[in-house]
Amino acid sequence: MVLQKADLVVIGAGPAGVAAAIKAKEMGVNNVIIMERAEQLGGLLHQCIHNGFGLQYFKEDLTGPEYAYNFIEKAKGLGIKFLLETMALDISPKREITAVSNKEGIINLHPKAIILAMGCRERTRGAINIPGTRPAGIFTAGVAQRFVNVEGFIPGKKVVILGSGDVGMIMARRLTLEGVKVEAMVEILPYVGGLIRNEVQCIHDFNIPLFLEHTVVDVHGTERVKAVTIAKIDKDRNPIYKTKRKIECDTLLLSVGLIPENELSLKAGIKLDPVTGGPIVDETMQTNVSGIFAAGNVVHVHDLVDYVSFEGELAGSNAANYILSQALFPKMKINLKAGEGIRYIVPSTISGQKKATLYMRVLKPDRDVVVKVGDDFLRKHLPIVKPSEMLKIIIPLSKLKMLKDETKELTISCTKGRK
Amino acid sequence: MAERLLYADVVIVGGGIAGTAIARELSQYELDVILLEKEIELCFGVTKATHSFIHCGLPEEDTPLINKLSLESNPMFNQLCKELDVPFMRVGKLYTVMNKNEIKILEKIKEKGDIVGVPNLEIVNKEKLREMEPNITDKAVAALYTPTTGLVSPWELVIALAENAMENKVKIMLNTKVTQILPQEDDVFIIKTNRGFIKSKFLINAAGLFADEIANMIGEDNFVMIPLKEERYILDERITGLVNHLIRSPITGDFISPTKKELAPIENNIIMGCVPQKIKDKTDATTSKEGFKRVFNYAKEMFPSISAKDIITSFAGSVPLNSRTNDYIIEPSQRVPKFINAILGGIGVTASPAMAKLIVEILISQGLKLIKKQNFNPYRKGIPDFRTLPEEERKALIAKDPRYGHVVCRCETVTEGEIVEAIRRGARTVDGVKYRTKAGMGRCQGGFCGPRVIEILARELNIPVTEVTKKGNNSRLLLFKSKELLRKNWR
Ligand SMILES: Cc1cc2nc3c(=O)[nH]c(=O)nc-3n(C[C@H](O)[C@H](O)[C@H](O)COP(=O)(O)OP(=O)(O)OC[C@H]3O[C@@H](n4cnc5c(N)ncnc54)[C@H](O)[C@@H]3O)c2cc1C
Ligand SMILES: Cc1cc2nc3c(=O)[nH]c(=O)nc-3n(C[C@H](O)[C@H](O)[C@H](O)COP(=O)(O)OP(=O)(O)OC[C@H]3O[C@@H](n4cnc5c(N)ncnc54)[C@H](O)[C@@H]3O)c2cc1C
């Protein structure tokens, strides 16, 4: 295909990508193209037919497809161009994109800016190294969700779920409603991995046996899964063999975490944060490669889609600024550092010239903690924190203005306390 | 099913590397050859769980046949793989030691290799070693370098051998299990299978771990097969470039190795392995926590920057050992000389080309007349590999068949065109598609493409989605249609 004219190319038509494209278009960018690998728009939302989306963004409780639909309609109305079934294969550090589709063949694009919104993938069995046989019947929870909600198939009738991420919990309920017996949900940590809301509504309300501080130590069956053996773990995470118990089942679902999808980013020369697995971004969501921005689960795994959309909009508006007038970009002067109790912070740098919105995760669940920015520069008491629930901290501009000129770094910590 | 009777000059039992190498070798001659395989696809036995090195032929103590066949086979791979369009690469091996006084061990191995004629062996010092392996631990002091050690994908090789054999009129029957061999009548075997009877003048036992069962059928019971399990762990291709050669301990046998970009199917990833452990159950392919620890510790010791997080998958397989010798059994049965054992053990992929030639010699000595075919075609073309093709060729491919523009597996960039072609050539299962195309081999391990591959298999094979299996038999992936269970439960 001939080189398409494009000012902005967004890779991925999930909530992050679509929100970013809308924002950029609204701000006056002419040719906005969204490239999507799948046959449909909406990213992961398209298989999330449960409710719980949009409480922040729309102040309304929507299903995934409804939430996505609102954005997609708007994007279409604005004349944003969608290339479906089109997979980006390569991005160069100079922002040259190579993509392929069955309709158009090989596509080459060289836009003024790119927004990466490729989402994430699920961690697999290999990544967590479960011993045992390799039969049919082991799926990640997201794949099972796609089979049940999109394709109309049920993997099996007796299921054990390893891991208690949100997808796993949602699937525990979904499968129960399909007549499947969920024999157990097994979690290695002493607490559930996903949102409290999902723990209550999907696990407790459906009486699903929950085994905390347990793991799967063996898989049985050579052709199809016949059973799994679970055991309690000690403080070094070694299984305590006398607590072993065998649970008969035909399916094992894994809900053991998501990993940002960044093979393309690496090809473009983008630096990744080893903790989040996503690109290191500044407060404008720009990566270390000029003109390449990123938003959504590709940057760090979100638990609420509303924040994904906000992040997409932020990337979209900054990409628009970048395309329309590079001069507007302030210099990033202050590094943000994860201190005690904090796993990561996005963004990694801020300018100090604008209100800063920080997203972060804590290392462990706790009650009555104080999140501190800098040396007592800003503090916030929180009655309860959980690693599964992202924290959002806003530093107002008025506060930032009080910083000394030579401030190069702010450490953020989360420690016990009430004030 | 209607019982049918087929005739052959030679029947080969087993569709692993042994059986297919023999089938291809015999396909040069004017013969009726039938290969029988009990599984739904070829290469679902021992050969499935390998990622083969082509060893250089360094001799071991009491295995004269293995030594001879592997030394003869190693140089054959260039031409063989060229004819069959199978990627092959000589990566070289470094027998690495961590202790100055262990250099003596290397010298001894080298001396033995030099005597039998293993080419270009060299002991490299610490500096040279670090030049060859910049990321190796500082503690490594020297290595024996064997430049002819190669890497090949066993799956590609087996499929290619079989496709080329079929091109040259060998008949391959899948899902066909030999259950009984009736006493010879008029010098002919009558072989009973689940799909009817076959009469054959010669019978070759290439049944791998199950070769003892086949031998039993003619009353040969002087050996049993013993599985020797090995575990393998595969690392993400992100760390490609970390390891350049096969690095092995001459003392424990533990190793870590890269595989190369051009090599299907674990492309670019680094693989770690460990030495075997004898087990009882022939179908045991379990990996263990202990195995993991051992393998990982060696890898980490040699390349300290490797982390457990880099592991994307693991598997185990069993080397078929026999109880009679430490060596292969490649010979006519003493009881029934037209029954010929072709029983490999360790490093059987390496030894297969010379082993197949040895089988031909044995057949001749047992009275089989061989006439070369006039029209034997030694060439076979593989499935186009979209990912490694240059842009111009990609464009041409898509222009011919737009399905090559539809990427199904995004980790390994495998297109629908390749998957459909794999099914046309005989893939029947998700694993079969995976081994032939690499779809699902990458870091997400089929998370994204799994559902699509199932759908394509169902469509191309014209079967319901719920009938698609991972690896044949009872390994169906999706057991029910949605709402089916609810209906059942209410009844
Ligand atoms: C099972 C599950 C349940 C959830 N439940 C809730 C909930 O109840 N409430 C809530 O608020 N949030 C929920 N979430 C979170 C929310 O769905 C995600 O955070 C959100 O979908 C992430 O949006 P994204 O745009 O970053 O990524 P995605 O939605 O994953 O979109 C990324 C898109 O990029 C495409 N893409 C990737 N690579 C390429 C390429 N190379 N070329 C072209 N296209 C490409 C992908 O096909 C995909 O469509 C849930 C998530 C999951 C997994
Ligand atoms: C983990 C591992 C790593 C290895 N690495 C290497 C390496 O790096 N280099 C190397 O050279 N070698 C390696 N090997 C050794 C090599 O894989 C074996 O020597 C070789 O695969 C044996 O092949 P085969 O054809 O004899 O057996 P198989 O592949 O098992 O073939 C036998 C076939 O016979 C079929 N069969 C059995 N019974 C019947 C019946 N009754 N009717 C019909 N069909 C039947 C089986 O289904 C099977 O497909 C490795 C082995 C393992 C386990």
Image (cartoon, rainbow, N blue to C red):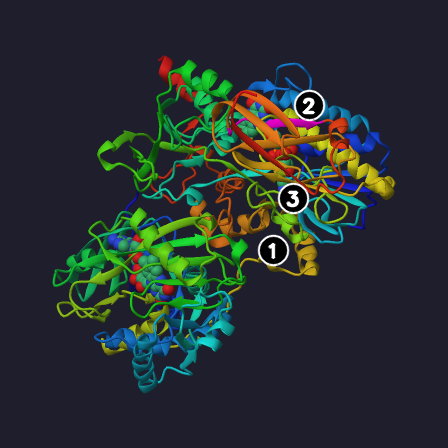
Ligand 1 neighbours mark 2 (CB distance < 8 Å): no
- Residue for point 66% across, 50% down: A270
Mark 2, other Cα within 10 Å: few <14 / some 14–19 / many ≥20: some
Residue in view at x 45 percent, y 60 percent: B156
Above or below, B52 relative to A403: below
Do marks 3 and 2 share a chain? yes
Of the residues shown, which amino acid type is indicated by label 3? Answer: Ile
Q: Is residue B34 left or right of residue B243?
A: left
- Mark 1 residue type: Phe
Query: With respect to residue A167, does B250 lie above or below?
Result: below
As helix, strand or loop, the secondary structure at mark 1 comes to helix
Marks 1, 2: nearer the viewer: 2
Q: Position of residue B417 (x, y in %)?
A: 59, 49
Quick check: which quadrant has ligand 1? Answer: top right
Closer to viewer: mark 3 or mark 2: 3
**Disc 3 marks which residue?**
A280
Q: Nearer the viewer, residue B404 or A283?
A: A283
Q: Which residues are magenta?
A: A387-395
- Callout 3 environment at 10 Å: few (<14), some (14 to 19), or many (20+)? many
Residue A394 in the magenta stretch? The answer is yes
The quadrant of the rendering that contains the N terminus of chain B is top left
- Residue A349: quadrant of the picture: top right
Where B67 falls versus A381 (above or below)?
A: below
Alpha carbon separation for disc pair 3 and 2: 30 Å
Q: CA distance from mark 1 to mark 2?
A: 34 Å
Mark 2: which secondary structure? helix
Q: Which circle marks residue A69 in the picture?
A: 2
Specify the subunit that label 1 lies on. Answer: B
Disc 1 target residue: B386
x and y, in percent, of residue B31 in the image: 35, 69
Q: Which of the two discs, 1 and 3, sits closer to the camera? A: 3
The chain to which mark 3 is attached is: A
